[in-house]
Amino acid sequence: MRPDLPIRTERLLLRPYRDTDIDDLHAWQSRADVTRYVPFAPRDRRAVAAQIRRKLTATQLAADGDTLELAVTLPDGAYVGEVLLFYRSAEHRGFELGYIVHPDHTGNGYGTEAARAVLRLAFESFDAHRVYARLDARNDPSARLLERLGMRREAHLVSDEFVKGEWTDTLVYAMLENEWAAGATAPPVNERSRPSDRE
């Protein structure tokens, strides 16, 4: 499954990573406030360089465990963040959604717009049956983003993971192909008219 890249939305460009993205990636991966709810600690430039090398080849999904990792930018090239699509199960046509927005660009609905484009890719191009997302239960803005996408909260796992020195709860949101199809016929939501959740 190799998407036709870049993917253009109303306001964004989702494209493969480049070597030159290292400064933009380091700008958020080095911050403790941004990485608070993700499963890694702030990274130094050397660790981010290793991430960039991996991301350069993460442009297609061929087997369970593969990841599509796309930089999200504005039309002028300004880096907004990233979206990820994990291929979890070929047998069950299952995928996992991931995303992060650089703090300089939160509150504009960019995360929702980019994530919706990846959901469309999964359901309409990759024949997904189910797409889910996992998040730290304390991450309210992320939960609101998933709800704006029309994803259902399926589970609240209590004290299920030991992350950064403490036991944390995990929320699981999901959407099935028939739910996506039903939602695709609904009137589009104007993200810019909604209250800011600092996504």
Image (tube, rainbow, N blue to C red):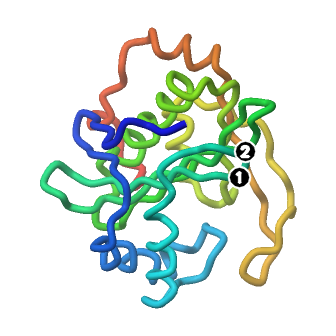
Residue at horizontal 18 percent and vertical 58 percent from the top: 77
- Identify the residue position indicated by label 1 in the image: 65
Which picture quadrant has residue 37? bottom right
Q: Are marks 1 and 2 in contact (CB under 8 Å)?
A: yes
Q: Residue 92, percent across and down?
A: 79, 30
Q: Quadrant of the N terminus?
A: top right
Q: Amino acid at mark 2?
A: Arg
Front-most of residues 173 and 115: 115
Q: Residue 59, percent across and down?
A: 47, 51
The secondary element bearing badge 2 is classed as: strand
Front-most of residues 164 and 192: 164
- Identify the residue position indicated by label 2 in the image: 88
1 or 2: tag closer to the N-terminus = 1
Task: Name the side, left or right, on which 140 lies relative to 103.
Answer: right
The secondary element bearing badge 1 is classed as: loop
Residue density around tag 2, few if under 14, some if 14–19, many if 20 or more, within 10 Å: some
Residue at horizontal 63 percent and vertical 76 percent from the top: 40
